Image: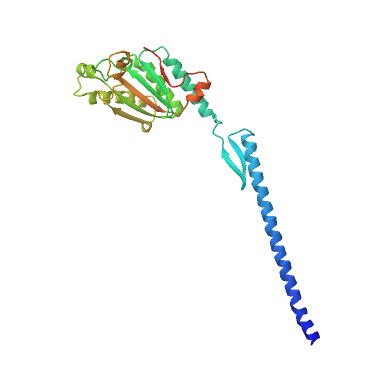
Amino acid sequence: MAEEESKELAGWVPLFTSLMILMCAFFIMLVAYSSFDTKRSKKAIGSLQGTFGASGSLGLFPTSGGALLMRDSRVKSKTPRTKLRVEKVRAFTRFCEGRKGVRVQYSAKGIRIDTAERVLFDLGSAKLNKNSRDFLTQVADLLKESQSRAIIEGHCDKADIEASNFASGWALSIERALAVTRFMIKHGIDPRKLSSYGYGQYDPLTIHNGEKQKFNRRVTMLIDIGDVRDLLKDSGEQDGEKETGS
């Protein structure tokens, strides 16, 4: 009887041993795969660090779950396109300095340029005057180099309407905006990047008499060039509003 039990045990022991060996091999493979994947992750992270530098735009912050990759917003990327854009903005600002009736403002969205009526048009007229070409050529160059979108707005006031042959301030203001738009297109600006609006006499900058009232009769150009204020500040340019002439 003892011999029969011994023979039965001898029959399943090899099978059990083989199963244990297979299970051990399986767990060894799992451990090896996990170790290999970790090495790959570390290698990828190290590659990113090497690309951006130790203090670049990417930072590593250890957490309980491993390494978390986060963007450092304090570091600004200065690509060649950004440098070109800033140089163009700086050159345009210098061009505007000392010009009467021109006001330049910087914002998070881009540049706002207000040109009083006499800079581009005569009183009551929607035809560009002889003094407008140099100024608008500079704006066109800025748009062309930056490949930015622009909104062109026409504005007028009661004195404009009374001196014009147009039926309303709407008609006068939109014709002024379209005259500037046509100039831009003629100088190589993609029409799809331009929008034109006429506000008539209904969007004055001031209702009081004084120096700023001249800007009620104006063309406003809003150039979607992005926020360049910090870069201009680093370059010594004035941040925010800059009226370049009186």
Residue at (34, 16) in percent of width and height? 132
Q: Nearer the viewer, residue 196 or 109?
A: 109
Q: Residue furthest bottom?
A: 1
In the picture, measured across the screen, residue 22 lies left or right of residue 163, that is right
Residue at (69, 52) in percent of width and height? 35
Q: Quadrant of residue 29?
A: bottom right
Can residue 217 be seen from the camera position used here? no
Count of numbered tags: 0
Q: Position of residue 110 (x, y in %)?
A: 42, 27
Coloration of the structure image:
rainbow
Q: Residue furthest front?
A: 64
**Position of the C terminus by quadrant:** top left
**Does residue 6 lie above or below 31 as drawn?**
below
Can residue 41 be seen from the camera position used here? yes
Q: Nearer the viewer, residue 126 or 114?
A: 114
In the picture, measured across the screen, residue 39 lies left or right of residue 189, that is right
Q: Nearer the viewer, residue 46 or 177?
A: 46
**Position of the N terminus by quadrant:** bottom right
Q: Residue furthest right?
A: 3
Residue at (35, 20) in percent of width and height? 114
Q: Quadrant of residue 204?
A: top left
In the picture, measured across the screen, residue 224 lies left or right of residue 179, that is right
Q: Quadrant of residue 71?
A: top right
Q: Position of residue 150 (x, y in %)?
A: 38, 28
Q: Position of residue 104 (x, y in %)?
A: 40, 20
Q: Nearer the viewer, residue 119 or 136?
A: 119
Q: Position of residue 21 (x, y in %)?
A: 74, 67
**Does residue 177 lie above or below 211 as drawn?**
below
Residue at (59, 42) in percent of width and height? 69
